[in-house]
Amino acid sequence: MKTKKSRVTYFVALGVIVVLLVILGISYKDVEGGFYGTVWSLLPPVVAIGLALISKEVYSSLFLGCLVGALLISQFKPWDTVLTLVTSDYGIVPQLAGNMGIVVFLVVLGIMVDLMNKTGGSAAFGRWAQKAVKTRCAAQLITMALGVLIFIDDYFNCLTVGAVMRPVTESHKISRAKLAYIIDATAAPVCMIAPVSSWAAAVSGYVQSDTVNGIEMFIKQIPYNYYCLLTLVMIVVISILNLDYGPMLTHEYNAQVKNDLFTTPERPFEGADTYEEGEKKGSVLDLILPVVVLIVMCVIGMIYTGGYFDGGVTFIDAFANCDAFTGLPLGGMVALVFTFVYFWLRGSIDFMKSMDSVPNGFIQMIAPILILTFAWTLGGGMTRNGLGSAEFVQAAMSNVGNLQKFLPAIIFIIACLIGFATGTSWGTIGIMAPIVVTVFDYAVVPELCVIGLAASCAGGVCGDHCSPISDTTIMASAGAHCFHLNHVNTQLPYAITVVCVSFISFILAGLLQQVWLCLAIAVVLMVLTLIVIKKIVSKKHAGMFAEMAEADKILYANK
């Protein structure tokens, strides 16, 4: 019945979209400028996200969102729509070609993970973790700690943490949705508060001017970046309190009580975690060494693209000028060659068997590559050269009035909405940061300028974190081997909780403008909010929590 109802809702939504497009096609026919810079420029992501949430099917939803964007850009001209969707600067083919470095990096990670599975490295690490990590809380906190340590780039973070921590969390019956949330929550949020990262380089470039140093501004905004900081606080608190709520509670209940890590029938990476005959002679070093080499090589690859080895460029400046889309696959390819040679020399796998990992690794990454391609296309159509969503946002920002001290909170919410609609934090910050430094003159109101920049960065990360069309969200799902929409649905209530506390914190920051006092208040508010939620949820779902506690006792009694 539920499936039938969802199907009916989906077709009703499709009908509404078709009728709306017909009306728009008639109303805007041959109108100069078309839909550029209007509220309709936000329609494509609304269609994609809405249909995905209704149908629980992401591929067709993203494609239809791309199609709607192409229709609006071409003003409903059939042949121009096809060209826009496929071959224009923001079409499927150019977007895939322009992001091929990330595709290569995804495939490299897939091959390495398959090799580590075949040679027993993943299984050995899982056996070690079962002995060393004694509780669910510790397993979650170690996952978080690894995510914090890999702060160089969010793409790299998602896939590496997932590969390393899947066997650990599985042994403690932590659902794949919970693992995906922790990965996602320690990817973009950590990168945004790390002075040495590809994100610091991007943000500093957006605000660099003759009067404002970009890196200095980035560092100053870190203690005001409430969404990123409070997200990390939330992971610690919910791990210690053993707190889950919303759809995540169902996933964790099924994992602990029913031994079902997935809850839903979808298994997008089924068989990818099946360890083969090499597992008995595998060692923990067979997983740790390739991952360490991968990290080192990716860092070297990134600073290489930033000109560090040409001389005259500092390590920080090299990061500020790096090209992650080139550096990551470059480092990944070197690490992959090392991994092959290492396993051959150890006798863990023969040449022919190892070559099977090449197509297997690619197959494992087909789903995220397909979703990313559509997401890139959808976001590309909303740029200044496409539908001009930035112009619409700038016009909306000009109408907020002179409420300067409340403006950071408003900026935060607007950035959240843009990030959610476009699925990109960098794009959102690229839109909002120049507006912030224009609205707040750093020479006149330096503290408000810093708070405003923090609000735009926090909002961009938040929208990206929540959006089902975000590349980071997609790769967090891939890293955890979690069905993508399960990850989106389960993490949304957690993200909204942090949004509410962050919004209040930005209001206080604008009024008080005392960096450490405001941060302390924000942390206390976050902890108190979660304690209240814990009391409410525990009372409402007492039976479920009792069963989960009993399942935990049985699990750890046998360890």
Image (cartoon, rainbow, N blue to C red):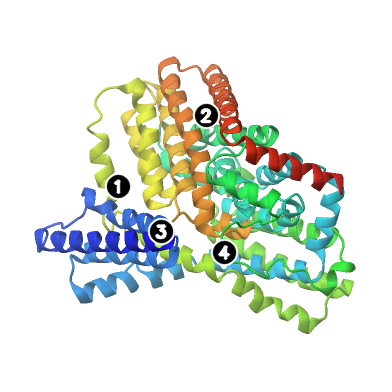
Mark 4 or 3, closer to the camera: 4
Query: Disc 4 or 3, which lies upstream in sequence?
Result: 3
User: Residues at badges 1 and 4 in contact (C-beta under 8 Å)?
Assistant: no
Disc on res. 220: 2
Query: Disc 1 or 4, which lies upstream in sequence?
Result: 4
Mark 2 or 4, closer to the camera: 4
Relative to 409, say whether 203 is above or below.
below
Disc on res. 390: 1
Circle 3 is placed at which residue position?
52
In the rendered image, the residue lying farthest to the bottom is 352
44 or 285, which lies in front? 44
Q: Residue 165 in the image: state x and y as whole percent.
A: 72, 53
Seen at 66% across and 62% down, the residue is 331
For label 1, count other residues whose C-alpha is less than 10 Å away and answer few (under 14), some (14-19) or many (20+).
many
Q: Residue 185 in the image: state x and y as whole percent.
A: 58, 44
User: Residues at badges 2 and 4 in contact (C-beta under 8 Å)?
Assistant: no
Q: Residue 418 in the image: state x and y as whole percent.
A: 36, 45
User: Residues at badges 3 and 2 in contact (C-beta under 8 Å)?
Assistant: no
321 or 447, which lies in front? 447
